[in-house]
Image (cartoon, grey):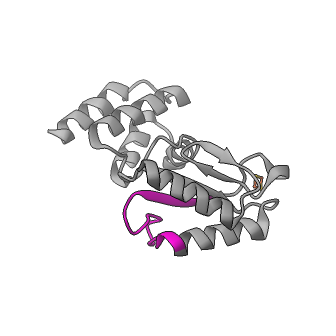
């Protein structure tokens, strides 16, 4: 049933040449509404339908936090770029330990996805972290603890 719906969505967006970003996002949203997330194989098929490289879809997935690779509830992007530097990496390591993040980047309880990013374009306020699309600046471990408690409270 779901496969049929996915096929219909992909067919709808296929054959129009290279799709603009807004249409790719729209297609990915429709897929997510059907499956609850956008799994690896479906992202590849979406790239084919949109006539773009898979890396374009991956980039869009990174910049639209509401688009999910797996059915987790929250997504945390930790900036480990040049300006956020070592403190960003410390925050990332702390989160991985605290949430028992596996190789797939998902917390042991399956509710939080943790990823790194190389710049959130707010360099002078770092280290920065984006949680469900909202940027938090000058993030310390204490601040992270508080933020995690908050999202777990609404999980
Ligand atoms: S390096 Fe972290 S916001 Fe730019």
Q: x, y (%) of residue 70? A: 37, 53
Q: Which quarter of the figure is the N terminus placed in?
A: top left
- Type of secondary structure dominating the magenta stretch: loop
Please identify the residue farthest to the right as the structure is shown.
124
Image point (52%, 72%), residue name: 98
Please identify the residue farthest to the left as the structure is shown.
1
Q: Nearer the viewer, residue 147 or 61?
A: 147
Q: x, y (%) of residue 15? A: 38, 27
Q: Is residue 20 visible?
A: no
Image point (32%, 43%), residue name: 36
Q: Magenta segment: does it hold 103?
A: yes
Q: x, y (%) of residue 39? A: 35, 51
Q: Nearer the viewer, residue 34 or 97?
A: 97
Image point (45%, 72%), residue name: 103
Q: Magenta segment: does it hold 123?
A: no
Q: Quadrant of ligand 1?
A: bottom right
Tell me where the magenta segment starts and ends, as one range.
Answer: 98-116
Q: Is residue 36 visible?
A: yes
């Amino acid at each position: 049933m779901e496969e049929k719906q996915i096929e219909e969505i992909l067919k709808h967006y296929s054959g129009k040449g290279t799709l603009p970003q807004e249409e790719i996002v729209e297609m990915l949203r429709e897929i997510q509404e059907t499956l609850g997330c956008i799994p690896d194989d479906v992202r590849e098929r979406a790239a084919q339908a949109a006539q773009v490289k898979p890396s374009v879809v991956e980039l869009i997935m990174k910049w639209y936090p509401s688009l999910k690779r797996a059915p987790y509830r929250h997504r945390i992007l930790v900036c480990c770029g040049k300006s956020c530097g070592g403190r960003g990496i410390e925050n990332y390591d702390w989160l991985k330990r605290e949430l028992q993040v596996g190789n797939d980047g998902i917390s042991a309880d399956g509710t939080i996805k943790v990823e790194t990013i190389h710049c959130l374009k707010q360099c002078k306020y770092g280290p920065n972290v984006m949680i469900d699309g909202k940027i938090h600046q000058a993030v310390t471990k204490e601040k992270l603890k508080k933020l995690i408690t908050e999202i777990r409270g609404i999980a």
